[in-house]
Amino acid sequence: MNALRGNTLKGSTLTGPEIEAGAELAGQFCRVRQQTETLCEPLTPEDMMVQSCPEASPAKWHLAHTTWFFETFLLSEFLSGYRPFHPDFIWLFNSYYNTVSDQPLKKLRGSFSRPSLEEILGYRRHVEEAMTRLIESGVTEDVRRRIVLGLHHEQQHQELLAYDVKNAFWSNPLHPAYRAGELPGSTAGVVNWVGHDGGLVEIGYGGEEFCFDNELPRHKVFLEPFELGSRLVTCGEYLQFMRGGGYERADLWLSEGWDTVKAQGWKAPLYWFEDDDEWRVFTLRGPASLEALMDTPVCHVSYFEADAFARWWGNRLPTEAEWEVAAAALPVEGNLMESGALHPLGAGPQSGLGQMFGDVWEWTASAYLGYPGFSALPGALGEYNGKFMCNQMVLRGGSAVTPASHIRSTYRNFFSPATRWQFCGIRLANR
């Protein structure tokens, strides 16, 4: 997922209106920090050590790295007399800010048995107390912007933590549940095509609140008339693709996608498995019958799978500009983290576009590149977006584990096309 940046931090979507300095900002800081630890409450210390795939990080590492951000980019620069919690944490919990320090290989994060969970929680308290002092001392606009950036950074890691816990529990042969309880029932409704006239339109962020630098500058693009599916592609529809030989037909796949299918032995989305001749799906609530999820959006498919499915269905994936123009006038609401479902849900009967926000990140046909006139920040805070603008595809809309205040119609997520561990799915565009 794209990391959080701040060259245009004019406000914060955390509350909607402009954040006031002092108590308001301190309250937002405490609530976001608490949410991360709330997400960890169902986990044991042993759970929090697991790193089950190269994309993932242990939950314990997420707790430390989100704290590292505030210590590195705020306290060490702006709080007079601040003493770092531990001199080695500056490099130990660095992700990939090369201008800050070297860092351990990402694949080794699961081997960090020390520092202990207790020490990392102590690190969080140390930094939170110092941040309270910083905020109470009165903050400049630059400091306020960095705090808002840090809060969005932590929200990003809340979503990543959900991805990583799901993969860790999937990798456990016991397939434990992160949260008890059944998934809500779902219905899908009929797909309708919702048209747009196209023409000369503007995309990119144009408001006065928080955005990432990769959402800028706002600029004009020309679109041919297009239609988007009124809902996301369901598990039942994807099962038709599988039964129709979708994973056996090379003509449906991009060359690299076909090579990946053969090399990885893909026959179904990630977390689908066969048990006594029945397809089942692993969720954060444990395994569930595919039969019960047929009307829910298919999830954990790669860009290659999404593209092949669209071609097999006789359609295509939307471009990110088409998606953004269609979503721009819609309210930012849907099955997001706050719903508590932690899994995509069916759209039900509806008119117009549904499920544009939440449920699954939607693959687009657009490569992740800078907009015309894009300029990354100088220094360490400029490392997150611009340097990844190669070999990645754009996704839009958020997922069932995205915090609601962290998403908007201009938000550009990005992943490499073979990646499946994030909550990602499919919306079709009509040719």
Image (spheres, grey):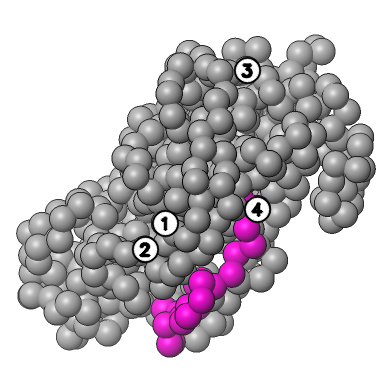
Q: Which residue is mark 4?
A: 365
Is any atom of residue 238 visible in this view? yes
Q: Are marks 2 and 1 in contact (CB under 8 Å)?
A: yes
* Region in magenta: 363-385
- Which numbered disc covers residue 233? none
Mark found first going from the N terminus, 4 or 1: 4
User: Taking 342 as reference, is 240 above or below it?
Assistant: above
Res 202 → quadrant: bottom left
Mark found first going from the N terminus, 4 or 2: 2
Mark found first going from the N terminus, 2 or 1: 2
Q: Which residue is mark 2?
A: 205
Which residue: 13% across, 69% down? 135
Res 327 → quadrant: top left
* Three-letter residue code for mark 4: Ala
Tell me the CA gap for discs 2 and 1.
Answer: 6 Å
Mark found first going from the N terminus, 3 or 1: 3
Which residue: 64% across, 62% down? 367
Which residue: 66% across, 71% down? 390
Between tags 4 and 3, which lies in front? 4
User: Taking 181 as reference, is 58 above or below it?
Assistant: below
Helix, strand or loop at disc 4? strand
* Three-letter residue code for mark 3: Met
User: Taking 391 as reference, is 138 above or below it?
Assistant: below
Tell me the CA gap for discs 4 and 2.
Answer: 20 Å
- Which numbered disc covers residue 294? 3
Tell me the CA gap for discs 4 and 1.
Answer: 16 Å
Q: Which residue is mark 1?
A: 410
Tell me the CA gap for discs 4 and 3.
Answer: 25 Å
